[in-house]
């Protein structure tokens, strides 16, 4: 079987409450046992993926942190696209000086472990996000935010207007040295603006993964729902949007499924195509 299937997680493969249904788990694992190559592309970290997808057969490399990292489920790092310390500090300093904004910073230690740095005085949206990281040793409060040697992403959580203004300023000052992704958060009432390495996105990661998997773009199928999946769609031969996807993504899709993420859209499609079972 030369085909390769890659799905986004939040609001695509996972249900809105972040659960994975027994049906989706059963279909996925059956497809893998049939020899299908399935993987995920997500903004989440390896730790988060392990927790959410417990019991799922994940034998192919995973695209993590929106494409910054490619790794196996066992933790072997295959590829990292990180901002260096100088560039990371430049982003932090510009945001602080021009907008009075502080980021959350996701970095990688020398041993490959992730660190999550947050400002000593987080804003209300950052506090809401941090409340979900109970007793996580990777999460560190820093009095003065500075970049690490390897910065996987810097994340600003603010209003749509303020993140748009910061994006304009950073693009004007730093140009093509950085990549910026900005979108409304599906769970918290704010906008996320993520600053990344120019190759730290799902599109570049998928291109690398296709080489790793030895599969042609034409034989790659991707599933998505939101803005950060647009690049993924551009690098795939077949692009499939779930019913709850944003219109901008549906316009780029070869197929819009009649089911939403809460109706196990991805699993139902895989069951029909790979297991040849009807829904």
Image: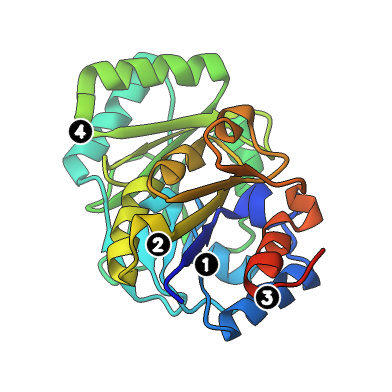
In percent of the image, x 27 and y 45: which residue is there?
199
* Residue 121 drawn at (x, y percent): 52, 35
Judge by depth and name the residue closer to the eye, 146 or 219. 219
Observer-side mark, 1 or 4, equals: 4
Q: Residues within 10 Å of mark 4 (few under 14, many from 20)?
A: some
Using the image, tell me which numbered label, if any, was put on residue 47: 1
As drawn, the residue found furthest toward the left would be 86
Q: Distance between the residues labelled 2 and 1?
A: 9 Å
Q: Mark 2 points at which residue?
A: 114
Q: Name the residue under label 4.
A: 177
Q: How crowded is mark 3: few (under 14 residues within 10 Å), some or many (20 or more)?
A: some
**Mark 2 or mark 4: whose residue is earlier in sequence:** 2
- Could you say whether the residue bearing mark 4 is in a helix, strand or loop? helix
Q: Do labels 2 and 3 touch, CB within 8 Å?
A: no
As drawn, the residue found furthest toward the bottom would be 33
Q: Name the residue under label 3.
A: 275
């Amino acid at each position: 079987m030369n085909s390769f299937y890659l799905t986004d997680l939040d609001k695509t493969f996972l249900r809105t409450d972040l659960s994975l249904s027994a049906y989706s788990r059963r279909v996925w694992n059956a497809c893998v046992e049939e020899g299908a190559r399935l993987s995920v592309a997500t903004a989440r970290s390896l730790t988060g993926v392990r927790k959410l997808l417990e019991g799922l057969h994940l034998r192919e490399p995973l695209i993590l942190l929106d494409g910054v990292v490619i790794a196996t489920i066992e933790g072997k790092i295959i590829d990292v696209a990180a901002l260096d310390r100088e560039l990371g500090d430049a982003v932090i300093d510009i945001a602080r000086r021009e907008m009075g904004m502080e980021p959350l910073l996701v970095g990688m230690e020398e041993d490959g472990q992730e660190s999550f740095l947050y400002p000593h005085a987080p804003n209300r949206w950052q506090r809401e996000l941090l409340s979900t990281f109970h007793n996580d040793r990777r999460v560190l409060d820093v009095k003065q935010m500075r970049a690490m040697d390897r910065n996987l992403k810097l994340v600003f959580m603010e209003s749509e207007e303020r993140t748009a203004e910061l994006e304009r300023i950073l693009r004007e000052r730093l140009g093509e040295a950085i990549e910026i992704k900005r979108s409304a958060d599906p769970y918290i009432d704010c906008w996320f603006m993520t600053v990344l390495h120019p190759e730290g996105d799902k599109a570049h990661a998928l291109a690398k993964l296709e080489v790793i998997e030895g599969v042609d773009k034409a034989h790659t199928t991707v599933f998505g729902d939101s803005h950060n999946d647009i690049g993924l769609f551009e690098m795939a031969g077949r692009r499939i949007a779930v019913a709850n996807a944003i219109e901008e993504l549906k316009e780029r899709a070869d197929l819009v499924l009649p089911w939403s993420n809460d109706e196990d859209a991805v699993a139902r499609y895989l069951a029909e195509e790979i297991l040849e079972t009807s829904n």
